[in-house]
Amino acid sequence: MNSSLPTSLSVEAARTYIAEYELMLLPDFLSGADSEIQKLHLVYLHGKRSTEPLKFKTTFSSGAQKAAKMKMQQSSYDRFFLFGDPTSNKVVALFTSEEKESRVITRYHTKITPGCVVAVLEPRIKGTLSDSDNVLIATAEPLVPVGNINDISFRELPPFDIESENDIRFFHFKSTSVELKFVMPTLDLCKGAFCDGKWPKNTHCACVEKDGYGTWGVRAHIKCDELQLDRTNHQKSSFISVSFAKLVTNNHEHLRPNDPNTFNNLNFRKCLGELVKEINRHTLEPEETRNPSFEGFKVIGWFKPSKTEGDSFQEVHEFHIVSLEPNCELTTRMQSLKYPRPPHA
């Protein structure tokens, strides 16, 4: 696999290099538009290492009429990635066949985190995932982080009719009713930005470079009006993140959640609850005026449909939250609610 981007390019230089590529929209790409010297802007959602063969469908022509037919294929892979369209709920996937290819694709992994907008250069359609219409794409170039979350419309809610959904879906919205339930500081998570603690260290994480040391993050279930978690009995919304733990704490790297002498889990949960409430309503300083345009959280995630195995087991309907960011700059009061709180003067 040969990339046209020189390996010596920094992230900033790579962004300058790809500025000459024309931005194409996902619907045009999926309809068969030529992607040469074109780029797609997609939101990185999820990555994992190989655990089992990947099944997907490809099209081919057969017979005198050259009618298009679908052929099921199975392939081993090294890394598997999911991406969302910033302006819709569409999800596309990409996989690499070996670690060398993974290192090319994730060259700028230190600057890419779940929820980040990336440029995919000269993409090609490889097929569709089995049992769905999610398109499988390929590229020979590294993912280049765009670094501008404003590319995301934040206007897509999770699918409502989840019982009949077959495709993986992307959702992105703003909410002023976010709650974190069953909060638990979680140890020995991957330190890589590309993973953001979504996997324990040394497991099926998509990161290609690791230092062997783990870190800690926040694990919780996310509840808000937009998710409507009460629509079925088999539904949950999971969230785990190292970057969020850094956002809500002071001196994250020096905190030890497994040391009861220096970390009080109950106080941590109380501080986090108060901080989340404050961000939801965002009282502007110094005036006590509210501006709804800068309240609450930006929520980014993806939905995995359930799969029935036989007649006795059904997988839980899962909303995977990959990014939870305040829809505002943290005010002085918000900073004071971080854990551990600064001592009073």
Image: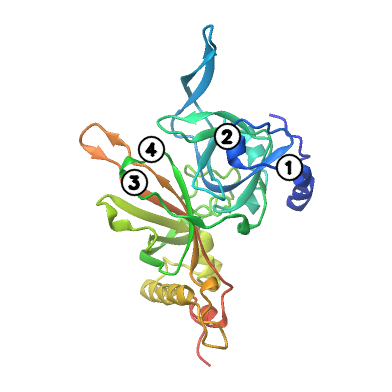
Sequence-wise, the earlier of marks 3 and 2 is: 2
Give the CA separation, mark 4 to mark 2: 19 Å
Sequence-wise, the earlier of marks 2 and 1 is: 1
Closer to the camera in the image, 304 or 162 = 162
Quarter of the image that includes the N terminus: top right
The amino acid sitting under disc 2 is Leu
Answer yes or no: is residue 80 visible: no
Residue 125 in picture, x, y percent from top left: 58, 30
Q: Residues within 10 Å of mark 1 (few under 14, many from 20)?
A: some
Give the residue at mark 1. 22
The vertical placement of 252 against 289, above or below, is above
Circles 1 and 3, Cβ within 8 Å, touching? The answer is: no
Q: Residues within 10 Å of mark 2 (few under 14, many from 20)?
A: few
The amino acid sitting under disc 4 is Asn
Give the CA separation, mark 1 to mark 4: 32 Å
Q: Residues within 10 Å of mark 3 (few under 14, many from 20)?
A: some
Sequence-wise, the earlier of marks 1 and 4 is: 1
Give the CA separation, mark 2 to mark 1: 16 Å
Residue 268 in picture, x, y percent from top left: 41, 73
Circle 2 SS class = helix
Circle 3 SS class = helix
For the point 24% across and 31% down, the residue is 310
Residue 270 in picture, x, y percent from top left: 38, 76
Give the residue at mark 3. 162
Q: Residue furthest top?
A: 64
Give the residue at mark 2. 30
Q: Which mark is residue 166?
A: 4
Circles 2 and 1, Cβ within 8 Å, touching? The answer is: no
Closer to the camera in the image, 339 or 81 = 81
